[in-house]
Image (cartoon, coloured by chain):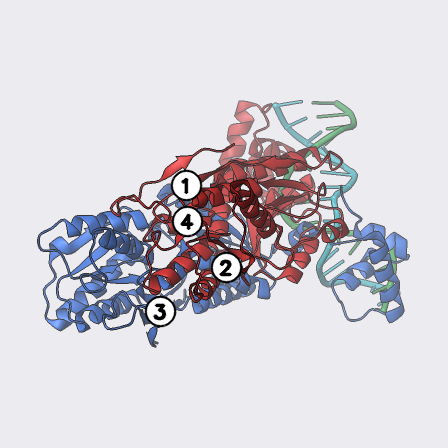
Chain colours: A red, B blue, C green, D cyan
Amino acid sequence: MAGPTLRDVAAEAGVSIRTVSNVVSDYPYVADETRARVQAAIDRLGYRPNLLARSLKQGRSHVIALVVPELDVPYFAELARLIIAEGRERGYLVMIDHTDGDKNLERELILQNARPMNFDGVILSPLALSGADLSERPPGAPILLLGEKSFDSLADHVAIDNVAAADEATTHLIDIGRSRIAAIGVQPSGYDTAKLRLKGFRRAHRRAGIPVDRSLLMTAARFHRTDGAEAMRRLLARPDRPDAVFCFNDLLALGALRAVLAEGLRVPEDVAIVGFDDIEDGRFSTPTLTTIAPDKQTIARRAIEQILTRISKSDDDAAPLEIRAPFRLAIRESTAGGGSRRQAGTNRRSHP
Amino acid sequence: MAGPTLRDVAAEAGVSIRTVSNVVSDYPYVADETRARVQAAIDRLGYRPNLLARSLKQGRSHVIALVVPELDVPYFAELARLIIAEGRERGYLVMIDHTDGDKNLERELILQNARPMNFDGVILSPLALSGADLSERPPGAPILLLGEKSFDSLADHVAIDNVAAADEATTHLIDIGRSRIAAIGVQPSGYDTAKLRLKGFRRAHRRAGIPVDRSLLMTAARFHRTDGAEAMRRLLARPDRPDAVFCFNDLLALGALRAVLAEGLRVPEDVAIVGFDDIEDGRFSTPTLTTIAPDKQTIARRAIEQILTRISKSDDDAAPLEIRAPFRLAIRESTAGGGSRRQAGTNRRSHP
DNA sequence: CTGAAAGCGCTTACAG
DNA sequence: CTGAAAGCGCTTACAG
């Protein structure tokens, strides 16, 4: 069960454990002859270092935790993959946990994960974490938040400009001539991301001089396809149905798309649809989905970089960083009236 | 940075660290008065145990590693979520890594993850691991394989009966009157899962007395939507195009679906499509996707149960277990000719 | 019911 | 360039 230890290798090679440790950790000042003898002993015994012991001694686990609402929501799965890859490049492993959209569990995980040395840091995509929850958190591993939140200056933070993105998405719908635009994904409370996207939606209307019809603002219990389909069905049941809809994420949009087509209507001719997240599904739906594409690669890289900086400097005092990642509007068939059905071409417009 | 230790709490409460440890780990024989005093000290100091130290001492990390080819492939994301949940119920955390479809990386991760005490166990969804690779693996944490593999009796194994499932999917296509059935996802070598699904495909044809047209067996570089779309386009370009296609996973099927619709053809009228995996996307595509639905919940539960058994018994000698999980055919619009477009109803047939 | 002590397997000043 | 030793923070026989 338990493999050979440093002590065993030292005995085998006839040196002290210090010397074996030096060889294992590539300490430069080891005589070639000694190194060779130790290496031979390591190979003979099949020694591999016990990382737990190393971590305990170093006070660092080389593990960061990633907590997301739902791992099987494509946006989070894609992000998780990128974060794992970025972590690996820097010698870090990623432990993943999910809250299932449960606010209490989120709070619990955050408090619990703060155990010193269990994780060196925590990257959290918060669902409804409040500033109060966060300040209650005992000191421990640094935490970094992804996406929006309603409080400032309590933790490092990486996100795109949600207001600007929602504005751009809505403006695009206005630009192609739509004027009765619905929004799906409005939240009654909490969920700062939804609030900001609604804000951008309103701002675009205001700039264009188009009033927002409040009855077209649809709430969604969650951000899944089924919620989008349900909201869309309610919209389509109205006599004055909308000619476009901005969905606060791609899953809602794909559900809405399904509902429109099931009703025998056409997208984008009857109803144009824009989503948010640029998940892969939207590039292969029929029609393909116009969406806001956050630069996930940058989000993942900056998140890992920043939390590792925080970990290595252990400068808990340094002011929390607000990091903005870029995004762009990916225009596809669900809003591109003129385009041929044959090609799933994507028109892109860069954004800082 | 470093929080209070057992020693600090002991000093604060005026007891030995043994007693504090007893309180923390809910050792029953502690005097109520003592327990209260210790608990008060714990609360006052904000003590939380260092899990690394506990793990080192106990020789168990309470962490299992999950290695999948790609975390953002919906099937793996869904499975990962279930495995995390099952692990959590049993006090285990899950570290996730992915190989990006790189066989060398897969081999590396498997060898590397074998470090004693880093993980208590490894659950691997192998891409192309050979029996030789596995036996080369140094002794360490037990390993459990998900999905198919070409070798026997080297590790515990959880999977559905792929031959039977592919047979059932193909038979369904034959039952609805199709006779020129293509297969997408055939692999030139390795990838045992694809081999078994092809075997089931052939078996269904044989039973029905329908010859398999070898030119309809399409390979796929990977199992993504784009590969399915590409294969389908090649099939549609032929004068004798197929009237049905069995895709070896849902992503291939969704890509194929997109290609058929883009060509102006109808599904299922012109081409019926069956997928494999029952990912959520297929329940919301238009038309919805008929597919083989493996019981992922059972796969996750049995995998966790078995690897924890292996870990706790440390009976490396016990013969590897072959565990079969159930599946069923979920019949949806992509093969249900008569159904109304309005309802995404799912017809289910249970299977052991 | 509780204390004093050993030890999990490593790293790292401190000497030499 | 290498050795002897302390200690990371815990758990757990061994005593009492």
Amino acid identity at mark 3:
Ala
**Do dots 2 and 4 share one subunit?**
yes
Earlier sequence position, callout 4 versus callout 3: 4
What mark, if any, has residue A18 been given in the picture? none
Residue type of the residue flagged with mark 1: Ala
To which residue does mark 4 refer?
B70
Q: Are marks 4 and 3 on the same chain?
A: yes
Q: Are marks 1 and 2 on the same chain?
A: no
Distance between the Cα atoms at labels 1 and 3? Answer: 29 Å
Q: Nearer the viewer, mark 3 or mark 2?
A: 3
Chain containing the residue with disc 4:
B
A159 relative to B151, above or below: above
Q: Residue A199's spot in the image, x, y percent?
A: 59, 47
Answer left or right for A311 relative to A38: right
Q: Going by the image, does B141 lie left or right of B149?
A: right
Q: Secondary structure at mark 1?
A: strand
Q: Report whether residue B117 is seen.
A: no
Mark 4 to mark 3 CA distance (whole Å): 29 Å
Q: What amino acid does circle 4 point to? A: Glu
- Evaluate whether residue A287 shows in this view: yes
Q: Nearer the viewer, residue A245 or A31?
A: A245
- Quarter occupied by residue A271: bottom left
SS category of the residue bearing label 2: helix
Query: Are discs 4 and 1 less than 8 Å apart at CB?
Result: no
Mark 2 neighbour class, 10 Å CA radius: few under 14, some 14 to 19, many 20 or more: many
Earlier in the chain: of badge 3 and badge 2, it is 2
Chain of the residue on which disc 1 is drawn: A
- Residue, disc 2: B81
Residue identifier under label 1? A330
Mark 2 or mark 4: which comes first in sequence?
A: 4
Q: Residue at x 32, y 58 (%)?
A: B250
Residue bearing the label numbered 3? B344
